[in-house]
Amino acid sequence: MWWHADNATYGLLLQGLAVSDNIAGPYSFVDATAPLGNWSQDFGIFTDYKDNSTYALYSNGDRVEGRDVYISAFNDALSEVDSVVHRFNKYDLEAPTIIQTDKSYYALMSHKTGYRPNNVVAFRADSLSGPWSQPFMIADPYTRTYNSQSGFSLRIVGSECTTYLYMGDQWDLRSVWDSRYIWLPLTVEDDKNSVSLEWHDVYDLDVKTGIVTPINGTSYAAIDAEVAGEAWKQEASFATGGKIVTGISGNDSTVTFSGIQGSGKKQWVSFHYQNTDDFGFGDQPGGSPDRIGGTWQVRRISSVVVNGDVAGMQTLYQRDSHKGIILSTPLELDLEDGDSNVITVGGLDNGNGTRGADLDRIVVYPSEDAWRAEMGY
């Protein structure tokens, strides 16, 4: 087992190794080393399915002497790195992961913006040793890769197609314990030398066939919802119906969606929002972080109450977005059977006020039983 080995101050930047006869352990510590004398940051591993060779993927730190990303080959025993296959020189990237097809290698990496998300880029090559292409963004511009950092990619060989999953980290600087993952299918177009990522609130992945099927839901626009307190409908050319609800704060300034169709079972409801607290139009906020108490605010928090059940209130984390870009966060809710469900969204304390994000719409998805039956499972 290899891992990023470090201390509490993130000052060692080593690769750790432990061994066991059983994948579940117990493991015996072997060593923690600097690969070929370099620092190692955001360390990952890639195995080439064509020849079963294994490689270490890592950045060599943030200091002036670093700012590179390495692809380095392990020895046959996987006990140490023994040679550099390619060095991405001074790109100042991290979190590398590699997607392999029969024709290409795509290296996905994130810019170094701390716990703040950015636009993940990819490089393409015929060989791990290069030459590699110019970097290109894998997701829609300004989405900051749906507020995620590249972490790992998974290749699923199905009977009908091969699917590649992007597994991204959604870091939350204020609540690191609530940092989450997003798993999304990647579209690989080898004829165009391209790989891209598309957001789906809910989708089905058949691991036997490899087929990905987006699940459709029913939209309820915020322009048609009822606002209370200081919440109001503001003109927004990019929003559904040309208006977005802003000023959602605490228990008194709320937006309420009525007439929502439910099935009497748990259903995913996606909240489409805009939140421009820190990033605005750029990928990195300017000024000093002490302007909001010593750390960047990278999300707002909303309360979600279904059918007046305040005791069963749900918490909705809405990470930052670019101005004019609508992102979404799904939440699993219990909806009653019929079309009389009511969802009220307010604000909760996020350490810098009680404002929720501006709401564009909600999308209600059928229960899992319903869409599985429709797909013939």
Image (tube, rainbow, N blue to C red):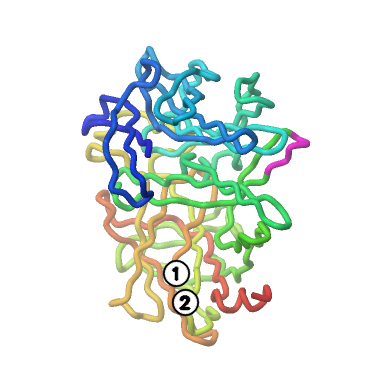
Name the residue that disc number 1 marks: 332
Q: Nearer the viewer, residue 277 or 188?
A: 188
**Looking at the figure, which quarter contains the N terminus?**
top left
Query: Which residue is at 36% across, 36% downward?
Result: 3
Compared to residue 63, the image places residue 77 above or below, namely below
Q: Amino acid at mark 2?
A: Lys
Q: Residues within 10 Å of mark 1 (few under 14, many from 20)?
A: some
Q: Tell me how far mark 2 sits from mark 1, CA to CA.
A: 6 Å
**Residue 7: x and y, percent?**
23, 31
**Residue 141: x and y, percent?**
59, 39
Q: Amino acid at mark 1?
A: Glu
Residue numbers of the magenta segment: 188-192
Name the residue that disc number 2 marks: 266
Tell me: 291 left or right of 185: left
Q: Residue furthest front?
A: 21
Asked if residue 249 lies in the magenta stretch, the reply is no
**Residue 342: x and y, percent?**
45, 78
Q: Nearer the viewer, residue 377 or 77?
A: 77
